[in-house]
Image (cartoon, rainbow, N blue to C red):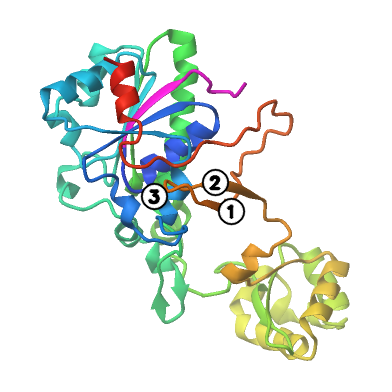
Amino acid sequence: MKSLDGLLVVSVEQALAAPFCTARLAQAGARIIKIERAEGDFARGYDAAAQGTSSYFAWTNQGKESLTLNFRDTEDAALLHRILSRADVFIQNLAPGAMARAGFGSAELREKYPRMITLDITGYGESEAARHLKAYDFLIQAESGLTSISGGVNEMGRIGVSICDIGAGMTAHAAVLEALMLRERTGRGSALAISLFDVAADWMSVPLIHQEYGRGAPRRVGLRHPSMAPYGAFETADGALTLIAIQNEREWQRFCAQVLGSDSAWQDPRFASNNDRVANRDALEEMIGAVTRTMTQEEFRARLAEAGVAFGGVNSVEDLGRHPALRRCTVVTETGAAIDIPAPPIRWIEAPDASALKAAPALGAHGPALRAEFA
């Protein structure tokens, strides 16, 4: 038995934020009825990397049931209401106001179905000033200032995955679980709302505090940490990069003695504290690099491990595929092809049911069965 067995979630969803949330609910045992327009979730056409189907769709739609509906059609609208009358959770991430105009706004549904939990996911909330802005991940990264502190010294950069969409989906998952716990105590559902911008702005709290109360927001520093040193990537004789992280003075002393082979470096007044090292970062990194460039990657990492200094490889995506810590699971695409992807991060150590989810659904694949079930 899984924790959410018996829970019915109806989701009018597309792209990534809402599908990510419902994917996590499906992994916990919830039944997910995915409502799509006739043309389908546009994430189905994002790419063809997953054995001819979309990598995004294959990743976040395992085990769901697909039903195509036209909300303006009287019979389809009535069918959706019949489904919702049995649902525990209703999630949607269409444009603001779209579901309300179709007669399925959260306020109306909460009044009609008081035990239901509703969740609206938007780009910028209900702000009139931002209603014209589209809820696309990269745009949210830019609007929230996230790109301004990401990238190299001379160029801003997009975070390499759809992090605002993913973050909103993670937050939505947590919010639904909280609302379910509250319903257990009160017997009533809740109306929830999450925006991608709110999630990104929350993550930007530390840079904003620095901007408004400190000495200004962190600068873009590439493979460096903006406020700790040495905390960055160093090259070895074979051209490989290794990222090291010094968190306190004990680690700095061990690093100097056991990795750099220097009893005097940690006594240099330019490097006496973290603040001093940050202020003299260029000289610090030149001193360290002069030593690391005489070693192979293997030798450098062996010394770091012996000294108990944190380090990691600056890996490629190909390297990730070979990483010893990577856990995988096999999923099935909408066309029946099997692919191996990273396993879900939540692990139930004593889970009695580790059964795999069914395949990602073809568009409308469950329509006949659902129409019969909710006739």
**Tag 1 near tag 2, CB within 8 Å:** yes
Badge 3 marks a residue whose secondary structure is helix
Label 1, label 2: how far apart the Cα atoms are: 6 Å
Q: Which of the two residues, 212 or 2, is positioned nearer the viewer here?
A: 2
**Between disc 1 and disc 3, whose residue precedes?**
3
Q: Quadrant of the C terminus?
A: top left
Q: Is residue 3 magenta?
A: yes
Badge 2 marks a residue whose secondary structure is strand
Kindly identify which residue carries mark 3.
165
Mark 3, Cα crowd under 10 Å, few <14 / some 14-19 / many 20+, is many
Q: Is residue 66 left or right of residue 225?
A: left
Where does the magenta region start and end? 1-12
Which amino acid lies under the numbered mark 3 shown in the image of this protein?
A: Asp
Which amino acid lies under the numbered mark 1 shown in the image of this protein?
A: Asp
Kindly identify which residue carries mark 1.
340
Q: Is residue 270 visible?
A: yes
Q: Is residue 311 magenta?
A: no
Q: Quadrant of residue 194?
A: top left
Kindly identify which residue carries mark 2.
331
User: Does 338 appear above or below 31?
Assistant: below
Provide residue 293's location: percent of width, then percent of height: 74, 89
User: Does 295 appear above or below 315?
Assistant: below
Q: Is residue 43 left or right of residue 292?
A: left
Provide residue 47's location: percent of width, then percent of height: 37, 61
Mark 1 or 3: in front is 1
